[in-house]
Image (spheres, helix red, strand yellow):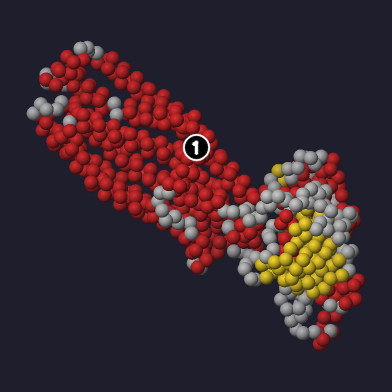
Amino acid sequence: MSTSVKKFHEEEQIGKTYDLQVARRLLRYLTPYVKLLIPALVLTLALNLLGILQPKFTQYAMDWYITPQTTSHTVAWALLKGWTISVTAFALIYLLTQFVRFVFSYFQVVLLNSIGQYVMYDLRREIYDKLQHQEVSYYDRNPVGRIMTRLTADVDALNELFTSGVTDLLGDLVMIVAIMAMMIYMDLRLTLVTLLTVPMLWLATNWFRKHARRGYDLVRIKIARIFSFLQEHFSGAQTVQIFNAEAKSLREFTRINDEHRNANVDTIFYYAVFFPLVDLIGAVGIALIIWYGGYRVMHGALTLGGLAAFIQYSGFLFQPIRDISDKYNVLQGAVVASHRIFKALDLPILITTPEQPLKQGRAGGRIEFEHVWFAYNEEEWVLKDVSFTVLPGQSVALVGHTGSGKTTITNLLMRFYDVQRGRILLDGVDVRDWDLQSLRENFAVVLQDIFLFTGTVESNIRLGREDISDERVHWAASEVRADEFIRRLPHEYKAEVRERGAGLSVGQKQLISFARALAFDPALLILDEATSSIDTETEQLIQQAIARVMQNRTSVIVAHRLSTIQRADNIIVLHHGEIREQGTHQDLLALQGLYWKLYRLQYSDPTWLTENREDEEPEQITYRPRGPSFSFGEGMG
């Protein structure tokens, strides 16, 4: 495993088991539901207190009705009470007690699970809202599968904490204290004999908690890896199949799945040892009770019913201790999940609206880049001292090889990232001083990789904007010639769109994206390789529509196909993050520089390359006859 991967997963581990700060923060999510929580706690206490009455019922049944009532202890008890009840009435009282426990248990489960569901709802909503506002660079750093784990497995861990962990732990502690008090009240010396097994139980519990915690952490790390792997390979299923990589993908998944299985098996070992060990220790305790308690019964110091009750209390005492050890894992999982969730929630959002924005509303459309330097990673500059101006209503085209900085310019313009040096102005105001929502509302973007959401064609064009009427949706689709294929779909604009637009061709998805951009009536239009997947005939059909839409709008076009940029008011040629040439189509052809070479590559006879090869350096021009890709000098292609 690479160092980077190891670092990625090692940061998941939490060093501290309990963190009071995290506990206090978790309680904040319970505050709105105090009216549900208090009755749930009361019911939990009542259930556990009613539970300790069962051994007393056993004692009284044996002493009053089953064994001959000849002992002085039993006679004194009956005289003290001054009343007697029939065995039938006694049995009915026992059943009534159990029925009350059943009713209390029902309402306790309903209340606790309701609280858990409400808290999960609030947490997931808060996390999702935070993630929606995180800058794009956050998603560059974090795999989607890892992010999904926060909203699923980690929140589920907290649900178990809120629905059973805290309340059951409180109930178990109350049960232990109540049982100990009852046993001491009944017979102090027999209670001390029973407690001889406590040191053994403490050692076993401490051993289990220590090893189970490490195993639990490891399981959580492995399941996060599975989430990340599945998300990546399901999203890239087509690529896997195209390159016949199914076997390799299966081997990799098998390895990750095997690591997860081994982590679980290792954890199961500690469970398999601990719980039978607790039962064995409990059996030792009961044996001591039978040995010493039987001696006291034979000498009349304890009734047979009292001995039976003591044996039951001993079992009841060990049960909550077992539960507390088991709940430790719930608490541990919740602490680990809490750290991960709060780490995500506490991440600062780097791209935000300033406290007092200088500009908002519809933009006029003037764009200015002033000595802009930008790098995704420290000093690895993607843009180097880039400066240019686009006047309102003008169109500018960005041309260059992959990685030359074309898309980066559009991302910076919409402030998905902030520049390290220089500044970008929109209508004379730095984009960092704009109201962020207002800034982005001024843009409509058509990308090469179109993303459609599950829903209908209409909802994908409107994209949640209720102020966009059906008439405008239909008009926008008609303008880009999307109306022609939409009318042929079942239910037309109400036709179902599956995840990521499955069932639609790439060209159809791009046409819907064009319609979406037009429907939003932006002040600025960005076309990023927007026609690269549309056939020549379709491209010709929408060129006029694009030209009309670009009227009175500032437009930024990123394209390899020169047919989409020849009419641009200004064409900027980028090379290794620097502006090498700019001007109109005719001006750049006259220069016979990088743009001119691109034009010859796309529209001239390929034999031109070999005929003029003597005048060129071998690495300056690369010709690929089957596609629009091209190179301008070293590193371009």
Q: Position of residue 317 (x, y in %)?
A: 27, 36
Residue found at the far top of this picture: 83
**Relative to 399, residue 539 above or below:** above
- In this orientation, which residue lies closer to the viewer: 512 or 47? 47
- In this orientation, which residue lies closer to the viewer: 418 or 572? 418
Residue found at the far bottom of this picture: 614
Q: Position of residue 267 (x, y in %)?
A: 38, 52
Say which residue label 1 marks.
30
Q: From where the camera sits, is residue 410 visible?
A: no
Quadrant housing residue 236: bottom right
**Relative to 548, residue 371 above or below:** below
Q: Amino acid at mark 1?
A: Leu
445 sits left or right of 110 in the view? right
Residue positioned 13% across, 36% down in the render: 292
Q: How many marks?
A: 1
- In this orientation, which residue lies closer to the viewer: 51 or 90? 51
Q: Position of residue 17 (x, y in %)?
A: 40, 51
479 sits left or right of 512 in the view? right
Residue positioned 63% across, 56% down in the render: 350
Quadrant housing residue 432: bottom right
